[in-house]
């Protein structure tokens, strides 16, 4: 009860109340705050299920004192229909509506971007004494629609053209097929159910099962990741975006990032998987750069390989820039298969680490505004000897390898080069892909995987039927409340902080520096770099 009172006292609730509660006419028996508080209580009790009937039933168990604290009139009898009507009023108050007959557009009285609203619902109750991390991990998970599929099984989701290539088991739905399905939705995509906005997309397989398809929504989450490797950082969700399944992950991911930024989360680095980083640069990488955000990313097989570099004597390999002195045996290394034994992965990482001797590493911070990065060759960093660099040949031969470069023939060992926006910008990152340092840093993305498991298993049990409404806004709003309960539980388990009974003084070890910490130790990627 206390948690619901605190959570529903947030500014976003007050704004909705101010827009929907009028001075004229008979006073309302309840407010927006009353209804959303009942929803939160119902979600906390059911652990991942939020039915409008259950929210109404909570009101019947309140005594007069509790009802008064939630702003419910003593004579009020809140029904499922009233809860549903309030949810509809919130939707109409925050989003523009179009009359299906006349085409007239009605402007919202309290316009709020859906992703911003969801983020405020989920992140707004976190106290300022628990500051957000500058480093965030992003991922999406499936939220299946309650509406049944009525189109023939076996279809392929109509995702964006630049989406990650997927190999999924065909849909085996045995629901009755209705004539005319799939319909064509207002967005031009296939509509397989009676829900006009639910769409078909892919979801990951569980317990070794192949990927499959589902109909519903993609839920994109931003989760705190420690800024200092090895420092404990309890999980908290800082940004949310819910979109129809199969929508562009880049657009949805940026919506979650923008919502977090607008809520005061100082994001300047993200961990993203191939679902985002495989997209065209203009749909993800460029948008991150426009916001001054760098990333640590994984590469799809199609993004790996060898290509000419921006300057004679240089080559791109797996998104990293190298001198053409890189041995052939190190140019096409295998990837890391799923569930690879740790000892095998460590041995493979050592081979990727060997590439460091031949890499042109970033010199200084990237110029994100112009999407440029300066690189410096290994001979200039004094890590190897090259016949084309007399200065490097003065290094001790017993401590520094000597390349097989031909004197007078261009190589990239001692060069300095600036890579522009057209030079593999999508694949570029500070740490070389596959190296031990990259694997250690990219492991921080597991935080968002943990958040998904909290939503699906440990703190909540989100599944088909968890909410039973139609339309993007209503589904997103109810799922947002469920996600808020997970953050409330995460605050208690990770920080010993109960929003209903906050401690007088909260001491948290997490600190936010003015400048991001150096990403790697000098003993890994910058060995021998003398400036």
Image (cartoon, rainbow, N blue to C red):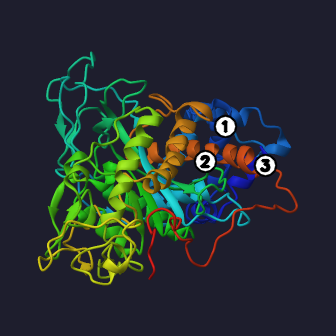
Residue 44 is labelled as 1
Label 2 and label 1: CA atoms lie apart by 9 Å
- Residue ranking furthest to the right: 504
Label 2 and label 3: CA atoms lie apart by 16 Å
| In front of the other: 52 or 272 | 272
Q: What residue is pinned by disc 3?
A: 496
Mark 1 neighbour class, 10 Å CA radius: few under 14, some 14 to 19, many 20 or more: many
Residue at (26%, 68%) from the top-left corner? 425
Residue at (43%, 55%) from the top-left corner? 438
Q: What residue is pinned by disc 2?
A: 484
Mark 3 neighbour class, 10 Å CA radius: few under 14, some 14 to 19, many 20 or more: few
Q: Judging from the image, what secondary structure is the residue with disc 3 in? A: loop
Label 3 and label 1: CA atoms lie apart by 18 Å
Residue 436 is labelled as none
- Foreground: disc 3 or disc 1: 3
Vertical side of 479 occupied by 214: above or below: above
| In front of the other: 437 or 400 | 400
Task: Assign the C terminus to one quadrant of the image.
Answer: bottom left
Sequence-first tag of 3 and 1? 1
Query: Where in the figure is residue 530, as x and y percent of width and height?
Result: 45, 80
Sequence-first tag of 2 and 1? 1
Q: Judging from the image, what secondary structure is the residue with disc 1 in? A: helix
Image quadrant of residue 306? bottom left
Any part of residue 71 in sight: no
């Amino acid at each position: 009860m206390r948690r619901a009172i605190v959570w529903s006292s947030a500014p976003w609730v007050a704004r909705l109340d101010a827009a929907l509660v009028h001075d004229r006419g008979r006073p309302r028996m309840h407010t927006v705050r009353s209804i959303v508080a009942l929803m939160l209580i119902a979600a906390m009790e059911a652990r991942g299920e939020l039915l409008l009937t259950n929210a109404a039933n909570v009101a019947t168990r309140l005594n007069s004192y509790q009802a008064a604290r939630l702003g419910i009139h003593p004579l009020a009898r809140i029904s499922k229909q009233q809860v549903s009507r309030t949810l509809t009023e919130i939707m109409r108050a925050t989003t523009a509506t179009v009359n299906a007959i006349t085409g007239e557009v009605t402007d919202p009285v309290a316009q709020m971007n859906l992703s911003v609203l969801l983020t405020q619902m989920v992140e707004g109750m976190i106290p300022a004494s628990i500051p957000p991390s500058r480093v965030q991990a992003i991922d999406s998970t499936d939220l299946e629609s309650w509406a049944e599929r009525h189109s023939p099984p076996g279809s392929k989701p109509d995702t964006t053209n630049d989406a990650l290539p997927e190999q999924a088991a065909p849909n085996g739905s045995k629901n009755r097929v209705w004539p005319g399905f799939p319909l064509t939705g207002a967005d031009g995509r296939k509509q397989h159910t009676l829900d006009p906005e639910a769409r078909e997309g892919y979801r990951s397989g569980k317990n070794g099962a192949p990927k499959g398809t589902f109909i519903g929504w993609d839920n994109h989450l931003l989760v705190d990741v420690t800024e200092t490797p090895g420092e404990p950082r309890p999980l908290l969700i800082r940004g949310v975006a819910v979109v129809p399944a199969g929508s562009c992950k880049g657009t949805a991911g940026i919506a979650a990032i923008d919502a977090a930024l607008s809520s005061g989360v100082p994001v300047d680095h993200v961990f993203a998987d191939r679902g985002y980083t495989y997209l065209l640069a203009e749909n993800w990488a460029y948008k991150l750069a426009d916001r001054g955000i760098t990333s640590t990313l994984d590469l799809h097989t199609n993004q790996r390989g060898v290509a000419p570099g921006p300057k004679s004597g240089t080559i791109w390999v797996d998104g990293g820039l190298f001198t053409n002195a890189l041995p052939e045996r190190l140019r096409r290394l295998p990837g890391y298969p799923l569930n690879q034994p740790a000892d095998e992965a460590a041995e493979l990482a050592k081979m990727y680490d060997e590439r460091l001797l031949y890499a042109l590493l970033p010199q200084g911070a990237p110029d994100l505004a112009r999407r440029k990065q300066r690189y410096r060759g290994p001979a200039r960093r004094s890590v190897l000897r090259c016949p084309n660099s007399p200065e490097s040949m003065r290094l001790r031969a017993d401590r520094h390898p000597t390349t097989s470069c031909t004197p007078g023939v261009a190589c990239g060992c001692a060069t300095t080069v600036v890579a522009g926006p057209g030079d593999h910008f999508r694949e570029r990152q500070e740490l070389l892909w596959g190296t031990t340092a990259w694997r250690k840093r990219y492991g921080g993305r597991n935080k968002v995987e943990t958040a998904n498991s909290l939503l699906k298993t440990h703190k909540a049990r989100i599944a088909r039927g968890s909410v039973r409404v139609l339309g993007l806004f209503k589904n997103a709003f109810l799922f947002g409340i469920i996600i808020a309960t997970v953050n409330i539980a995460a605050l208690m388990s990770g920080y010993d902080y109960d929003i209903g009974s906050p401690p007088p003084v909260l001491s948290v070890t997490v600190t936010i520096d003015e400048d991001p910490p150096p990403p790697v130790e000098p003993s890994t990627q910058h060995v021998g770099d003398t400036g």
